[in-house]
Amino acid sequence: MKKLLLTIAILPIAAYGFTDSDLDGVEDSVDRCPHTPLLVKVDRYGCPIDRPAKKYRGRFSLKVGIAHTEDSDFNNTLTNVTLGYSYRRFYFSIRTKYYLYDSNVGSGGMGDTYLFGSYSFKFDKLFVNPGMTVKIPTADSDFGTGNVDFIPSLTVDYLVTPKFDTFFYYGYVFRGSDQYGDNYTVSVGGGYKLSKPLYISGSFDFDKTGSNYLSIFGIYRFTQKYYTTLNYSYGINDKAVDHYISLKLGVKF
């Protein structure tokens, strides 16, 4: 059970890299025109250069997904729902999850809820995104510690070319439970925007416990409004969970 609880805070780090849902080269949290058609030249705010940038307007996003973790000691499957809201360079979200099944418990149950807030700074091709996650202990006793955790984080992303970016993520987990101790997670990688509405990234992820992962992340835009993401992490040492995969469907409105 200890390995399972530690994994909850480790595995999601691969998805914190650069995210560009409309594939215009502007990171989502600062993109004022989130539905720009492909191959349309945009300004630094993600709006077509042949028209003035839109005035600041908040927008919502909803993601629903399913994830599976597989290890020699256990396996589990869960669903998660994330509601996000962005305004100017601010981004806020609430995410909760429900375990459909866990082999250690023999059943499913409610997971914890996470509140996240961030602010994006943009310096030409460089994005700096500090954020804070607060874990709210909504989980059943078998799926959480029952304590509030605080996770300050920093994502730095650099656009090497209009199609290629590199990123760095660092997050420190201040646990409300002395039983498991604090932790940190680090992710270093890069991504490439393909000619089709597809962005793929790869990263090397590690944490304080010595768990090492290789991860891939992809986002595909079906339309200007609907998209899907896929994340897979492979544990490359004994301390890491063997396999983690997550599929999400998203909509912007």
Image: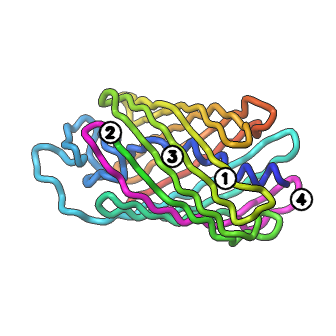
Q: Is mark 1 in CB contact (under 8 Å) with mark 2?
A: no
Marked residue nearer the N-terminal end (3 or 2): 3
Residue at image mark 4: 106
For the residue marked with disc 4, what is the amino acid? Answer: Gly
Locate residue 178: give its quadrant.
Answer: bottom right
* Residue 253 seen: no
Residue position for label 3: 16
Range of residues picked out in magenta: 98-126
37 in relation to 34, above or below: above
State which tag comes first along the sequence, 3 or 1.
Answer: 1
> Which-is-in-front pick, marks 3 and 2?
2
Q: Is residue 113 magenta?
A: yes
Callout 3, which amino acid? Tyr
Q: Amino acid at mark 2?
A: Leu
Quadrant in which the C terminus is drawn: bottom left
In front of the other: label 2 or label 4? 2
Other-residue count near label 2 (Cα within 10 Å), few / some / many at <14 / 14–19 / ≥20:
some
Judging from the image, the colouring scheme is rainbow
In the displayed structure, 207 sits above or below 81; it is above
**Element carrying mark 1:** helix
Q: Secondary structure at mark 4?
A: loop
Report the front residue among 34 and 213.
Answer: 213
Residue drawn at (58%, 45%) of the image: 13
Q: Earlier in the sequence, mark 2 or mark 4?
A: 4
Query: Which residue is labeled 2 in the image?
Result: 126
- In percent of width and height, residue 6 lies at 74, 51
- State the mark number for residue 9: 1
Q: Where in the figure is residue 69, as x and y percent of width and height?
A: 74, 45
Mark 4, residues whose alpha carbon is within 10 Å: few (<14), some, or many (≥20)?
few
Q: CA distance from mark 1 to mark 2?
A: 27 Å
Residue name at image x 81 percent, y 33 percent: 238
C-alpha distance separating marks 3 and 1 = 13 Å
